Structure formats: structure tokens, C-alpha cells
Image (spheres, rainbow, N blue to C red):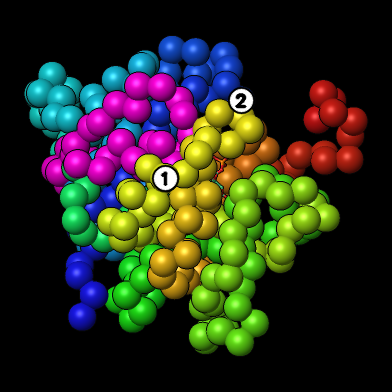
């Protein structure tokens, strides 16, 4: 039987330059989707998948993330005194959720490097990696879908999604073994390439931000050279690992939002607002009232 996945790594050291000036003094992971920070969606996904030891890879200027998941006595006392029970429960739920450990990346040397700095904290057991930018609404939760595949096949599992060709070069892309289509959206990986040019992409199966990895990824990453941009890519570490063991990919069933770019972020805000019973009706009425054919700036 495959060992249990208990730990999830959240790389969160990026500078968030796409959202400047909002992210000048605030981590991009703390931007809200309605009223919950982006990163909390990923953390709740991990917890509801049974993975409740969280390792956050942070950097300078990320203290707000640590504070968010810590107890806030001041705030709790205030809400208690005002009799704001619901909000108090909400706030306590956050800090009671799980065990947190933090490690600093130091230098921004890429996703592979961010995973490598968790080596001591992860130790010799399988673990999940969750890229918080990719917010996935799914039932069962996305990382649980991967854990299930891991438990069946015992090897590393990557989440993939078919993406249109004109977007493929934003992603790591896999080639699959033609004879190894294992079943319902599960594949054996033949090769992986990080952000290929459109014409070089080996398929339309893009890696999205969920992985279940085994501890032998660490020596593989340590042996992986940085690429042309000076970063160590997780995709290249996995390519190294593929020389010594099978790797699997799983098409996740759910709705993914890439909140790492402005349009994806806006779509996610609308999507989650329309799923909130306290907002949905009024917000839908507002959206329907917009004259979407008017020129930009005059709506
Ligand atoms: C990273 C990975 C890439 C993956 C993507 C998913 O890229 O390097 O392989 O497809 O996440 O979101 P990034 O989006 O950090 O540039």
C-alpha cells in the first residue's frame, strides 16, 4: 500500500509583479476572491483532502500570510465583545485549521528550487505541491483526485488539463505513452517540457498547479541545472526523475481559474461571487444590467 500523503508544499515566494501596485506591500497570495485570500482556497482544498500539514515557502514581504493563518487574539476579543459569533467562528476556523511550517526561499531561483528548500521539512515521505494561483473548484477536491491516483499506482502524479494551442507555451506540457492510457483521464508520462514553443508542444496536456511527489524528487532537483532564465524548473526535475521511475498524469475534473493573471483573477472573482448565496442574486442582476456592447470605459 502506498504511504499516506500528509504534507502539502505551497510555494509562495513570488514577487507578484503582474498585480502591481496592489502587490507592492502585500503578497499576491492575499488578494481576495470575494472575501477570502487566494491562498486560503488552496489550503482548504488540502485540508479537505486529508493533507493538513502545510509547508509554506515564503520570501521577503510575505508576513501577512503568516499572520493570516495565526491566531489573532486582538481580533477574536473584539468580535467576541461585539457578539459577532459567525465572524468569530470564521476567524477561528482559519487558525485552527492545520499545522503550519514556514521556510524561506532566499533567492527566487524557480519553482524547482522552491520545492527543493522544503527537503528537510518534507523528509522521506510523499507530499503534495499546490500552486495557489490555480484555484480549482472540484468535488472531490483536485489534490484528493491526485492522491487517489497516487494510492493506486504508487508513483508521482501531475494534474493536467487540455488547453488551447495558443496558450500552451505558458505551461509545462507532457507527452504520454500511447499504449499507456491507463483509464479515465489517467496517463503514463513519456516526457515533459517546460513552456515549449507552440509548434514544439508534444500535446495539448498542460501541467496545472497540483502535484503529488515522492521524496526521490529531491535528489533529481538537486541534479537539475538551471534553465536559460536562471531558474530550476520543477518540470525539468521531473524529467530527470522520469529516467528512474514511471510518472503519472491525471486530468482533474473541476473548474480551474488561473488567478495569476488579471483576466483569470477577475473571472474567478465573478465565478465565486455567483456561488455565494448572500451575493449571487443581486450580483447576477447587476451583471445582467451591464451594456456589454458599449465601448470600453462607457459601460
Ligand atoms: C508553473 C510551472 C508550469 C506549470 C504552471 C501551472 O509555471 O513551471 O510547468 O504548467 O506552473 O500553473 P508558472 O505559472 O509559475 O510560470
Ligand 1's quadrant: top right
Place residue 32 in its image quadrant: top left
- In-image side of 46 versus 15 (left or right): left
Name the image quarter holding residue 282. top right
Mark 1 beta carbon near ligand 1 (under 8 Å): no
Question: Mark 1 or mark 2: which is in front?
Answer: 1
* Residue pointed to by mark 1: 223
| Mark 1 → mark 2, Cα distance in angstroms | 31 Å
113 part of magenta stretch: yes
Whether residue 190 is situated above or below residue 122 in the rendered picture: below
Element under disc 2 = helix
- Direction from residue 54 to residue 180 in the image, left or right: right
Q: Nearer the viewer, residue 163 or 109?
A: 109
> What is the x, y in percent for residue 185?
55, 78
Report if residue 136 is visible in the image. no
Q: Which residues are magenta?
A: 94-120
N-term mark: 1 or 2: 2
Please name the residue that numbered disc 2 is placed on: 18
* Quadrant (top left, top right, bottom left, bottom right) of the N terminus: bottom left
User: Relative to 58, is 168 on the left or the right?
Assistant: right
* Position of residue 297 measured from the top left corner of the image (x, y, whole percent): 82, 23
Residue appearing at x 20%, y 67% in the figure: 4
**Rendered residue at 52%/25% (across/down):** 16
Q: Position of residue 141 (x, y in %)?
A: 39, 64
Total numbered labels placed on residues in the image? 2
Picture residue at 62% right of the left edge, 49% below the top: 194
Amino acid at each position: 500500500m502506498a504511504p499516506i500523503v500528509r504534507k502539502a508544499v505551497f510555494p509562495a515566494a513570488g514577487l507578484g509583479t503582474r498585480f502591481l501596485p496592489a502587490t507592492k506591500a502585500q503578497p499576491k497570495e492575499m488578494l481576495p476572491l470575494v472575501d477570502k485570500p487566494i491562498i486560503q482556497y488552496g489550503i482548504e482544498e488540502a485540508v479537505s483532502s486529508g493533507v493538513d500539514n502545510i509547508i509554506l515557502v515564503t520570501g521577503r514581504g510575505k508576513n501577512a500570510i503568516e499572520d493570516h493563518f495565526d491566531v489573532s487574539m486582538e481580533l477574536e476579543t473584539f468580535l467576541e465583545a461585539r457578539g459577532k459569533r459567525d465572524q468569530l467562528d470564521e476567524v477561528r476556523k482559519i487558525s485552527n485549521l492545520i499545522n503550519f511550517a514556514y521556510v524561506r526561499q532566499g533567492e527566487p531561483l524557480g519553482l524547482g528550487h522552491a520545492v527543493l528548500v522544503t527537503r528537510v521539512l518534507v523528509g522521506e515521505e510523499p507530499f503534495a505541491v499546490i500552486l495557489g494561483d490555480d484555484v480549482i473548484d472540484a468535488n472531490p477536491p483536485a489534490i484528493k483526485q491526485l492522491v487517489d491516483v497516487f494510492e493506486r499506482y504508487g508513483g508521482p502524479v501531475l494534474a493536467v488539463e487540455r488547453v488551447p494551442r495558443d496558450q500552451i507555451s505558458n505551461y509545462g506540457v507532457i507527452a504520454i505513452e500511447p499504449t499507456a492510457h491507463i483509464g479515465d483521464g489517467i496517463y503514463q508520462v513519456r516526457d515533459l517540457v517546460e513552456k515549449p514553443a507552440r509548434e514544439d508542444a508534444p500535446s495539448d496536456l498542460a501541467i496545472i498547479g497540483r502535484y503529488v511527489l515522492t521524496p526521490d524528487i529531491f535528489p533529481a532537483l538537486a541534479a537539475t541545472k538551471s534553465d536559460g532564465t536562471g531558474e530550476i524548473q520543477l518540470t525539468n526535475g521531473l524529467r530527470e526523475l522520469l529516467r528512474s521511475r514511471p510518472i503519472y498524469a491525471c486530468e482533474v475534473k473541476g473548474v480551474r481559474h488561473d488567478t495569476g493573471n488579471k483576466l483569470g483573477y477577475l473571472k474567478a472573482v465573478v465565478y465565486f461571487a455567483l456561488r455565494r448565496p448572500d451575493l449571487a442574486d443581486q450580483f447576477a442582476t447587476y451583471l445582467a444590467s451591464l451594456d456589454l456592447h458599449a465601448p470600453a470605459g462607457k459601460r
